[in-house]
Image (cartoon, grey):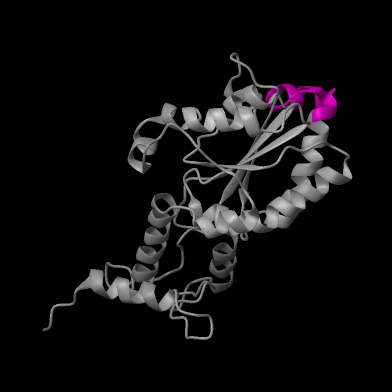
């Protein structure tokens, strides 16, 4: 029997999936029941629609079916690419986002040294000191984080919605900036330079096999050297299968306005809202 080169086969499948939309798609996104003659088909189909987990895929002997295995490899490759690839300069230019960098020199340092992504590089620090818009109500940061794919998929819809919502609230907003290889805590460094009241980071989250396009929003009111994680308000799972980006933008504008009203974020914000 001829030996099948599985890696080559997976590569061919990925190439097919990335062709233009008018061409045939081998693996549709809709889940397909792979279990033959299930005991309770209705319950199984219902469960499949309630979770992104790989259930009801069936098996061939003791192994996954070929279609399920190839889809697993495709999703795994998408997660890997989301972390490793760089944002396209044309994408940043189209959105008009100034580019800043953290102290991470490359993706390997970013992944292995957390602190390197928590502070701007010296050059970016100087740029922000000279060109950043100071003393605004809100500073928006966009960062690839651990998923470039999340930025590319969500920001084009989310950012306009967020800016429009903040404008309707009559809040002053500094020009949004993009930070390459940024961690959440880089927002504290940025806030210390531009002296904004609240800073929001829209950052790509660690991809999984369910989606590589999940974005999160981290907000903090006037961070300082004593800031801890519980001081941040977080909205996660922003993607087409979770909270849609346009809807998320409108909601985040409402939330930022409320954070400014109560002058607190994180646990303190929740406690003040509960009173």
Residue at screen point 52% across, 33% down: 124
Examine the rendering and report whether any part of residue 117 can be seen.
yes
Question: Seen in the image, is 45 located left or right of residue 112?
Answer: right
Q: Quadrant of the C terminus?
A: top right
The relative height of residue 24 versus residue 213 in the rendered view (above or below) is: below
Measured from the top left, where is residue 138 in percent x and y?
A: 74, 34
**In terms of secondary structure, what is the magenta stretch mainly?**
helix
Query: Does 117 lie within the magenta span?
Result: no
The relative height of residue 7 versus residue 253 in the rendered view (above or below) is: below
Measured from the top left, where is residue 4 in percent x and y?
A: 18, 77
Residue at screen point 45% across, 78% down: 19
The relative height of residue 70 versus residue 174 in the rendered view (above or below) is: below
Q: Nearer the viewer, residue 239 or 181?
A: 181
Question: Seen in the image, is 11 located left or right of residue 198?
Answer: left
Examine the rendering and report whether any part of residue 213 can be seen.
no
Question: Seen in the image, is 246 located left or right of residue 119?
Answer: right
Measured from the top left, where is residue 102 in percent x and y?
A: 47, 34
Quadrant in which residue 114 is drawn: top left
What range is drawn magenta here? 260-275
Question: Seen in the image, is 61 located left or right of residue 173?
Answer: left
Residue at screen point 77% across, 47% down: 163
Measured from the top left, where is residue 52 in percent x and y?
A: 52, 59
């Amino acid at each position: 029997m001829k030996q099948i080169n599985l890696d080559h086969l997976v590569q061919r499948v990925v190439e097919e999936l990335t062709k233009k939309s008018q061409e045939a798609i081998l693996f549709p996104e809709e889940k397909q029941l792979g279990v033959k003659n299930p005991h309770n088909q209705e319950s199984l189909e219902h469960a499949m629609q309630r979770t992104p987990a790989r259930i009801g895929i069936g098996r061939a002997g003791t192994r996954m079916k070929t279609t399920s295995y190839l889809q697993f490899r495709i999703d795994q490759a998408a997660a890997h690419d989301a972390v490793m690839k760089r944002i396209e300069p044309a994408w940043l230019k189209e959105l008009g986002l100034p580019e800043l960098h953290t102290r991470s020199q490359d993706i390997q340092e970013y992944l292995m040294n957390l602190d390197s992504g928590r502070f701007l590089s010296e050059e970016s620090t100087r740029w922000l000191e000279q060109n950043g818009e100071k003393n605004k109500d809100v500073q928006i940061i966009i960062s690839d984080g651990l998923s470039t794919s999340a930025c590319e998929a969500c920001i084009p819809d989310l950012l306009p919605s967020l800016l429009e919502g903040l404008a309707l609230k009559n809040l002053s907003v500094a020009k949004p900036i993009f930070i390459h290889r940024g961690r959440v805590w880089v927002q504290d460094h940025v806030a210390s330079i531009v002296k904004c009241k609240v800073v929001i980071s829209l950052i790509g989250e660690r991809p999984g096999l369910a989606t590589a396009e999940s974005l999160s929003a981290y907000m903090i009111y006037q961070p300082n050297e004593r800031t801890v994680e519980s001081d941040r308000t977080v909205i996660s799972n922003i993607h087409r299968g979770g909270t849609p980006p346009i809807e998320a933008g409108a909601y985040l504008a409402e939330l930022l306005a409320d954070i400014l009203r109560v002058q607190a974020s994180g646990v303190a914000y929740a406690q003040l809202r509960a009173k």
